[in-house]
Amino acid sequence: MIIQPRTRGFICLTSHPEGCAENVQQQIDYIKSKGIIKNGPKNVLIIGASTGFGLASRIATAFGSNAATIGVFFEKPATEGRPGTAGWYNSAAFEKEAHLAGLYAKSINGDAFSDEIKKQTIELIKKDLGQIDLVIYSLASPRRTHPKTGVAYSSVLKPIGEPFTNKTVDFHTGVVSDITIDPIKSQDDIDNTIAVMGGEDWKFWIEDLKQAGVLANGVKTVAYSYIGPELTYPIYRNGTIGMAKNDLENTVPIINDILKNLDGISYISVNKALVTQSSSAIPVVPLYISLLYKVMKQKGIHEGCIEQMQRLFQDRIYSDNVLLDNKGRIRVDDWEMRDDVQAEVAELWNNVTSENIMDISDLEGYRKDFFNLFGFEFDNIDYDKDTNELIEIESIKETK
């Protein structure tokens, strides 16, 4: 079929298999160009492995450390005349390239919050790898059904206390406008968001993996967080999402206690603001990222997901000295949060309008990155040609 982008707000409803494969290949090529991660992981489990930081983590460990990887995700395969999700095509392309390179790579598609998928993953580790030495937790989901109680929770994206008014941009049209977001109505909004996006499921995974005996001595685990600038605090760090991120970060000492007799350790990595399917949904953030991109590209310090993850593993987690901030977190948002960068972004923020946004921001770079997520706007892909939408993931095909 011929697949063109179809959007609804911050969502792209279609994805292109060849474009997704190109996206994956470019990330693989980058990792190969950076050399081998010294003392890197050998057997890696990535929970949330199909897009964004999770996909980049899988590529970085596989092609940067020759690691065997198991990826867990929840994606839709294609049916005839209807494309699969970008994460499905990304994972298919990754597995194909990993196998061509002689690397072990298998995938599990299902609800990572469920006990069933945890059990299936553990059985695969036992059968094929024995033990794993790195667990990456990179789930992004708006909903979670609790595996013990069966209660379904939905997260909300709201400020706490007062309504929040600030600038935002429609990145399709370039129109800058003010947006007001009403605050939470009750504590339930916070509790539900923590239930979906907090640290409990990460802890459940580590507990189940340890109990099954599939965690290697010296195992490391990392989950991803974000802080950002003060202008986004009301909707992010001080809002419902921020409360969930606090819970995630507060899970580190609990997991360290679980892992202590394995000499294991857990980390939170605070990452840079980037265009992902999740960040596109947060009002204010696309405008901030567009301005940030402009400043960081001018300074020669811009990074995408793959550059962030390469630096995280090579220069932080597997370095001789893991640098942590005063709250025990790894900071690969350090370039974003530099004083000179934030001062320039703040000045642009005060001056940006619909009339000047194309001049003073990198909205076009934001747009391109957004469509790249779904396999579109790659110069070497002919989007007017027929493409095979019915791409299968090799390891999932084998287990059918």
Image: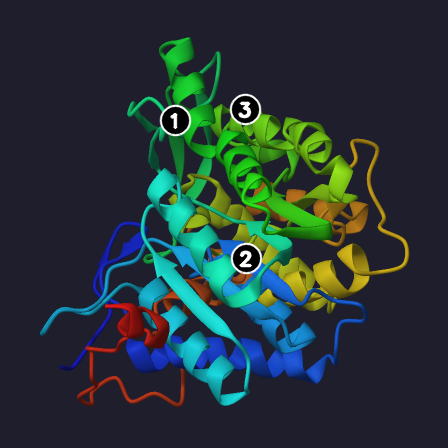
Q: Earlier in the sequence, mark 3 or mark 2?
A: 2
Q: For marks 3 and 2, give the CA distance.
A: 26 Å
Of marks 1 and 2, which one's residue comes earlier in the chain?
A: 2
Of residues 74 and 331, the one nearer the viewer is 74
Image position, residue 64 (x, y; %): 67, 75
Neighbourhood count class around disc 1 (C-alpha, 10 Å): few under 14, some 14–19, many 20 upward: few
Give the CA separation, mark 1 to mark 2: 40 Å
CB-based contact (under 8 Å), mark 1 and mark 3: no
Residue at left offset 38%, top offset 44%: 281
For badge 3, the amino acid type reads Met
Local SS, label 2? strand
For the residue marked with disc 2, what is the amino acid? Leu
Dot in front, 1 or 2: 2
Residue picked out by circle 2: 45
With 177 as the anchor, is 11 left or right in this view?
left
Q: Name the spot of residue 286 as percent of width and height, x first.
A: 47, 49
Real-space Cα distance between discs 1 and 3?
20 Å
Q: Circle 3 is placed at which residue position?
A: 243
Q: Residue at x 29, y 53 (%)?
A: 11
From the image, tell me which residue sits under label 1.
180
Side (left or right) of 207 relative to 378: right
Residue 312 falls in image quadrant: bottom right
Q: As rendered, which of 181 and 48 lies closer to the eye? A: 48
